[in-house]
Image: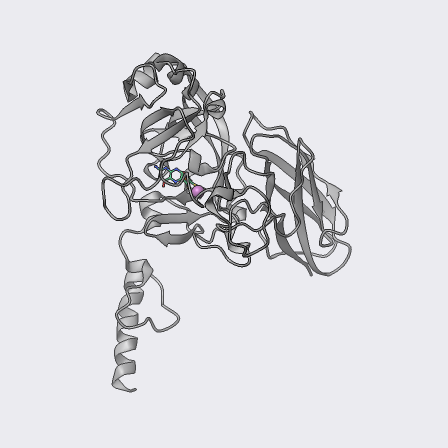
């Protein structure tokens, strides 16, 4: 054995011990395998081992469709999307939420204790989907995290209504928007820059389901999802739901914080051709998310014994609207059959669907799922309109099935 090869082999077996498994291919010189880079996101965030890390600076991690089969998404299967650095050393005893802005009557600060004791608490199951979920399918491709289908979750959130807080502080007649400010740090480390500061119009802020949450699935919110306090605006791009919430500004104009302007979380107001350049002033802020669904069982690639019927199930959601019909196709969209569809447990929660089908003979199939919202809009079969940043891909989810 040549010396170089020997060294490679030797270091590989040392690595194997550290990683807990053999590396199949030679690891390039000077490269530290991800498995050895500290910290381990799976341990740090308590994630299911099948979650997929898209980026480590900042942490962006997605689920796979089959991981999202639970009616209520548990923490270990929830996608994580960060624009900056997760804040450290959070002390819930000294944490405050300040309400300010041009349209506040008088600025006010609340401690966590104030929020928990002075206002009525509410729990809702709320769908949060990243505006960029599905980005990886656009052509020409859009820059940013290449989310496939897993940047969506529907957990239970407990907190107080933003509307009760806004009433308590008082807002002037000219209030049009609220904007959040959070404790995470810009990737540059510059404390004067915010990684993200988005918001929603007053009409959304004042909905019953818009929460200032301090619990997720009955426990303190996990650090990755915004401990100790988070704004939750279900049905809208999840970027509107500010984590590590410290301040809400009541604005007399559309909030102009980081990632509210330019191309961020905005799409062309009028449809454009794929690849077309769009001026910033022709871009509109994304509000309610479009109708969408996900087959969470079985996992794509499943093999079925001939003669057995195939059972499928999953979830469907439609932003501010309800899903009113759910269909599936086993012939690439030529014909569609109805699924059983449940009502949401509350407004803005996803809805469960199921169906059973006999696949006619041995061979390769795809199951496509298509939801229709209460205004009659359905998911596009392959791709929706292209946009520069690759938002709002609500194409039909598709899984592959073989009958043997
Ligand atoms: N403070 C803060 N809030 C944030 C973000 C962030 O980077 N910082 N990311 C937003 C985006 S783009 C998304 S998609 C959701 C992701 O929520 P999750 O990590 O709990 O899944 O949080 C939103 N709220
Ligand atoms: Mo997002």
Question: Is residue 74 visible in the rendered structure shown here?
Answer: no
Q: Residue at x 48, y 44 (%)?
A: 151
Q: Where is residue 14 in the image (x, y as percent from the top left)?
A: 26, 68
> At 40% from the left edge and 14% from the top edge, which residue is drawn?
167
Nearer to the camera, 248 or 154 = 248
Point 50% across, 51% down: residue: 388
Q: How is the image coloured?
A: one colour
Q: Is residue 120 left or right of 270 when viewed as pictured?
A: left
- Which part of the image, by quadrant, shows the C terminus? bottom right
Q: Which residue is drawn at 66% across and 49% down?
A: 381
Q: In this view, does 283 lie above or below 302?
A: above
- Write down the quadrant of residue 100 in the picture: top left
Query: Please, which residue is most extreme toward the bottom here?
Result: 2
Which of the 4 image quadrants contains residue 338? top right
Task: State the residue in front, 181 or 106.
Answer: 106
| Count of all numbered marks drawn on residues in the image | 0
Query: Which quarter holds ligand 2?
Result: top left
Relative vertical location of residue 209 with respect to residue 359 in this rendering, above or below: above
Residue 196 placed where, x, y %?
35, 39
Q: Position of residue 152 (x, y in %)?
A: 49, 41
140 left or right, relative to 172:
right
Q: Which image quarter holds the N terminus?
A: bottom left
Could you tell me residue 82's position as x and y percent?
A: 36, 44
Q: Is residue 330 left or right of residue 320?
A: right
């Amino acid at each position: 054995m040549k010396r170089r090869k020997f060294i490679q082999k030797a270091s590989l077996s040392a690595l194997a011990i550290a990683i807990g498994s053999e590396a199949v291919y030679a690891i390039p010189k000077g490269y530290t395998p991800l498995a050895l880079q500290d910290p381990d996101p799976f341990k740090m965030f308590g994630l299911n081992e099948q979650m997929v890390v898209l980026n480590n600076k900042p942490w962006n991690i997605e689920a796979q469709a089959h991981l999202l089969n639970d009616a209520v998404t548990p923490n270990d299967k929830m996608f994580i999307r960060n624009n900056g650095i997760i804040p450290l050393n959070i002390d819930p005893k000294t944490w405050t939420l300040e309400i300010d802005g041009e349209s506040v009557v008088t600025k006010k600060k609340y401690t966590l204790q104030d929020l928990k004791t002075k206002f009525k608490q509410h729990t809702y199951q709320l769908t949060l989907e990243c505006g960029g979920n599905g980005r990886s399918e656009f052509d020409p491709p859009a820059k940013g995290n290449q989310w496939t289908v897993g940047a969506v979750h529907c957990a239970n959130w407990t907190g107080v209504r933003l509307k009760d807080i806004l009433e308590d502080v008082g807002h002037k007649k000219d209030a049009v928007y609220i904007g959040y400010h959070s404790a995470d740090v810009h990737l540059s480390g510059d404390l004067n820059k915010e990684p993200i500061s988005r918001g929603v119009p007053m009409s959304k802020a004042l909905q019953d389901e818009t929460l200032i949450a301090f619990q997720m699935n009955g426990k303190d919110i996990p650090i990755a999802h915004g401990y100790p306090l988070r704004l939750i605006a279900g049905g809208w791009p999840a970027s509107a739901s500010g984590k590590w919430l410290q301040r809400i500004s009541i604005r007399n104009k559309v909030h102009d914080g980081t990632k509210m302007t330019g191309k961020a979380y905005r799409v062309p107001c009028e449809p454009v051709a794929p690849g077309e350049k769009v001026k910033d002033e022709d871009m509109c802020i994304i509000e309610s998310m479009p109708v969408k669904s996900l087959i969470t069982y079985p996992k794509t690639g499943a093999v079925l014994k001939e003669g057995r019927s195939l059972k499928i199930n999953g979830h469907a959601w439609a932003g501010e609207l309800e899903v009113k019909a759910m269909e599936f196709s086993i012939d690439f969209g030529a014909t569609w059959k109805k699924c059983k569809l449940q009502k949401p447990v509350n407004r803005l929660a996803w809805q469960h669907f199921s169906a059973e089908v006999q696949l006619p003979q041995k061979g390769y199939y795809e199951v496509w799922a298509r939801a229709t919202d209460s205004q009659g809009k359905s998911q596009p079969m392959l791709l929706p309109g292209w946009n520069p940043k690759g938002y709002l891909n609500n194409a039909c989810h598709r899984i592959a099935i073989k009958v043997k």
